[in-house]
Image (tube, rainbow, N blue to C red):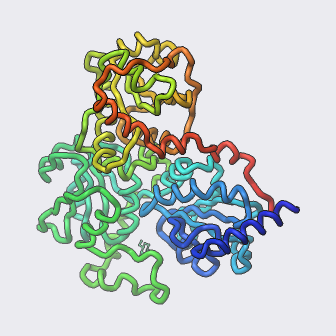
Amino acid sequence: MPHHTTLVAALTAALAALPSAQAGMYLRSSPVLQLDAKNFDSLITKSNHTSIVEFYAPWCGHCQNLKPAYEKAARNLEGLAKVAAVDCDDDANKALCGAHGVQGFPTLKTFRPGKKPGKPVVEDYQGPRTASGITDDVVSKINNHVAKITDKDVDDFLAKEGPKALLFTEKGTTSALLRSVAIDFLDVIKVGQIRNKEKGAVERFGIESFPTLVLVPEGTDSEPIIYDGELKKNSVVEFLKQAGEPNPDPAPAKSKDGKKKQKDESKKPKDETKAKADEPEPEPEEAPEASSSASSTAENAASTMIPIKPVSSTEMLQEKCLQRDSHTCVLAIVPSDDSEKGTRAVESLSKLNAKYIHGKRHLFPFFSVPDSIGTELGLRKALELSGEVELVAINARRKWWRHYEGDFGLESVEAWIDAIRLGEGDKKKLPKEIIVEKVAQEKPAEESSSEETRATDPEAEVETEAPQPAEEAESAHDEL
Ligand SMILES: *[C@@H]1O[C@H](CO)[C@@H](O)[C@H](O)[C@H]1NC(C)=O
């Protein structure tokens, strides 16, 4: 194949030009964990965490194409699951790739710890080759060792031996973050979650906002410690460390049975409680709404809001979002009288707004659009929107729009916004009739310019234009 030779030559030249590059496709600084035949077992097979592994060859075009999405998935999943890669072109790894039945590049496989240590459940990843597709699939495969607690069984939970961590939450599903924390502290700290509607426990612990994490250290009369940091993986782990060391991952090579010596000394023998099966079975099918890349971060923003701007006139909406050269706008079309869904949609956007502004991340602007204005501009008709509340993203300049479908909750809205940012997900053609020629600027210059800075998010514009690897992905296999 002459074109492989060319690729190899080009690659060799590129590598020579980049002093920091390695022979593999990923740089040392990449968030993707780089594996070889030596460390594969300890990092993947024997891990208590879920992983996805890409078997690739550096010369393979589809592997190169996947790289940005894969690195993005690795960042999304940081601390939650492992995103790893094996260079099958390296002679030292050929047997490993062969043993995993790799026949083309890239091959993606997920490894979920099974009942027997060291014998993970391995599945081919066949989903879209996008950051969110990969993230969602891996998140859905993070084992769930988090117990669901209610007022009825909270006493039993607290009476269990050893320290306990309890998350008070408004959600019924278990976030990827909490699941990964429970995996880190398997057999060290029992992790549970309890809903805000369990009034007895909420009152007993004096919980006033959700989510709130509480640590109940060893011993029945120990004072619960309320966590007031951010719900981020690292900080939560640091907080919980005061009650016990997380399991080392990978486990140190030497010790087979003595690895938890220090902790077990301070505890009674575990055998008596073991039979009671205090860990719930993994619940893989669980939590579609927890399975967004946003799940770990969405909760952080939960308490603060910066209200999104209401659109006060048809002209304003046209000027901001519907001109021929307007950038991406996110519009919540809401009924003028209070509606539960409308409030939820606006609240979710307001929380995200706060998060982006506090995080100094310039994103496309969010507006709430009174139903009357949406109707007057023919927006509802042109886009065939019939829901009581509608959430859309419009980019008049590039003539696309996207329709949000979901429960308007924070996580789901954030996942949708993230997908837009990445240029992923369904895009529809924007009907011509709602785009207007430049309208005369009526606003004072300063007001619209502040809007402008937010509207020109370079990421959003560049990425929406980028070719979508997903479209190619179906047939995306370079043969060996
Ligand atoms: C996996 O979890 C067990 C407890 O169930 C623990 O003893 C072991 O050290 C963990 N392994 C790793 C690699 O963290």
Residue at the far right: name it: 1
Taking depth in this image into account, of 406 and 144 the one nearest to the observer is 406
Counting from the top left corner in percent of width and height, residue 310 is at 29, 24
Counting from the top left corner in percent of width and height, residue 195 is at 26, 45
Taking depth in this image into account, of 6 and 157 the one nearest to the observer is 6
- Asked if one can make out residue 101 in the rendered structure from this viewpoint, the answer is no
Counting from the top left corner in percent of width and height, residue 128 is at 62, 47
Counting from the top left corner in percent of width and height, residue 469 is at 64, 47
Taking the image as shown, residue 186 lies to the left or right of residue 58, namely left
Residue at 29 percent across and 21 percent down: it is 339
Count of numbered labels shown in the rendering: 0
Residue at 30 percent across and 44 percent down: it is 357
Residue at 30 percent across and 81 percent down: it is 264
Ligand 1 sits in quadrant: bottom left
- Asked if one can make out residue 11 in the rendered structure from this viewpoint, the answer is yes
Residue 440 lies, with reference to residue 376, above or below; the image says below
Taking depth in this image into account, of 217 and 85 the one nearest to the observer is 85
Taking depth in this image into account, of 362 and 217 the one nearest to the observer is 362
Residue 183 lies, with reference to residue 350, above or below; the image says below
Q: Which image quarter: residue 154?
A: bottom left
Query: Which quarter of the figure is the C terminus placed in?
Result: bottom right
Query: Which quarter of the figure is the N terminus placed in?
Result: bottom right
Residue 178 lies, with reference to residue 285, above or below; the image says below
Q: Which image quarter: residue 103?
A: bottom right
Taking the image as shown, residue 144 lies to the left or right of residue 131, namely left
Q: Which image quarter: residue 19?
A: bottom right
Residue at the far top: name it: 376
Residue at 23 percent across and 73 percent down: it is 242
